[in-house]
Amino acid sequence: MLKAVKVRLYPNNEQKQIISSQIGGARYVYNRALALRKYAYSKFGLKIGKYALINHITKLKKRENTSWLKEIDSQAIQQSIANMDKAYQHFFKGGGYPKFKSRHHSRQSYQYPQRVKVDGNKVFLPKIGWVKCKGLRKEFVGKIKTVTVSYEAYQYHASILIDIEDETLKPCNNATKAIGLDVGVALVVADSDGNKVKPLDLMKELKRLRIKAQQLSRKKKSSNNRAKAKNKLAKINLRIANKRKDFLHKLSLQYAENQGIVVIEDLKIKNMTKATKGTVEKPSKNASAKRGLNRVITQQSWGLFFELLEYKLQERGGRLIKVDPKYTSQTCNECGHISKENRISQSKFVCDSCSYSENADVVGAKNILARGIHGNNASLKIAI
């Protein structure tokens, strides 16, 4: 089983310069290979493979104006080309077209495919040496697959992907217990047991983020002050992301440790957060409201929560079930009556057939559980 461990690096000044050169070299190789592939196909209809690009970079090392590439780790260069090739494969499967990497992006990184070692609170990186780190557990075991070194908001990190053959985790407390989860906007999660989890209070951080963004917009382009303001903005963004990840890790672990089966909706989040389109003749009247809703959905990080929940359940022998989300919030789980009028507000559900009343998100969670256990076409009357 593959598992990622992210640690904070504390390089000295000399090591910082080397890491910066490694990042710049990997970015240059990525962009050079991408430009060469695009040019060959657009001009001559030729498709240049990954290994041909690697051979081309080897030739560049012998040229006078690009001989500095010899200082860049050779396997990091090869991995950079491999990542560009993966971006193309993703494009062929329906993803976006590969883009050039910018040196002005807030997060910069490069990757080692092997030769990285770990010893206590130190990590050995080729071309750099032993670097102090924080975040490694004493019981760190497993074969290191890849290591991604990144720089963001004045901080250095290493994401270590390890292959754990036999990791024995304590199984969940009740392997046969099932629970339904309904994710929402007003509540992060409401479950079929009646528990409701409120979103994180990030008002202070978001206010600071807005102020720093305004300050950045006033800075002169390509100036040192703009670079400083950009890093300060990235630091707040990183803090918000870390707080959100910590919250979702703890929430998903809570359900994975106490339930053997968790049922969720099979949501198409990408489609849900699409912008409202309009025309010049008929402009969209709900564009502003839709943007606000999309922003809240992305801030709740439903996709990340489902991802964390799934792998934590699998580690403990549990199972994640996804069901059709249609009408889960409009169906009475007492009598099975389906109507839009049943949900009279964001949080209140009152059945106009049997007068059953409950929190709307909890009703949705109970319907989700019923579908996961009994199937989409079964009666939604829950007897669990």
Image (cartoon, rainbow, N blue to C red):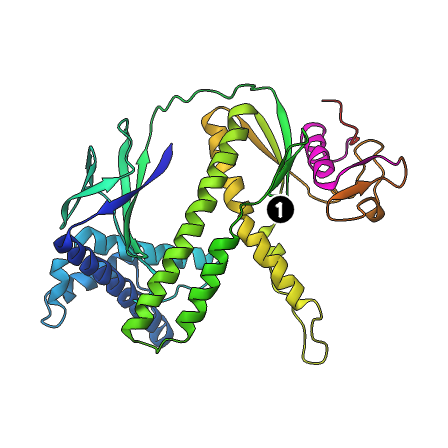
Please state if 25 lies on the left or on the right of 88 as rendered: left
Q: What amino acid is at disc 1?
A: Leu
Element class at badge 1: loop
Residue pictured at 62% horizontal, 46% vertical: 267
Please tell me which residue is depicted at 49% across the width and 31% down the height of the picture: 253
Could you tell me what secondary structure mostly forms the magenta stretch? helix
Compared across the picture, whether 10 is left or right of 277 comes to left
| Number of disc labels | 1
* Residue at the bottom extreme of this rendering: 281
Residue that appears at 61% across and 56% down = 271
On the image, the x and y values in percent for residue 252 come to 51, 34
Asked where in the image residue 121 lies, by quadrant, the reply is: top left
Left or right: 307, with 150 as reference point: right
Bin the neighbour count of mark 1 within 10 Å (Cα to Cα): few under 14, some 14-19, many 20 and up: some
Q: Is residue 377 magenta?
A: yes
Q: Which residues are magenta?
A: 355-378
Can you say whether 308 is above or below 152 in the image? Answer: above
Q: Position of residue 275 (x, y in %)?
A: 61, 64
Can residue 199 be seen here?
Answer: yes
Q: Nearer the viewer, residue 208 or 92?
A: 208
* Horizontal relation, residue 216 to residue 28: left or right: right
| Quadrant (top left, top right, bottom left, bottom right) of the C terminus | top right
The residue carrying mark 1 is 267
Residue at 19% over, 63% down = 57
Nearer to us in this view, 252 or 311? 252
Q: The N terminus is located in which quarter?
A: top left
**Residue positioned most to the right:** 353
Is 369 drawn above or below residue 132 in the view shown?
above
**Which x, y percent locates residue 240?**
44, 51
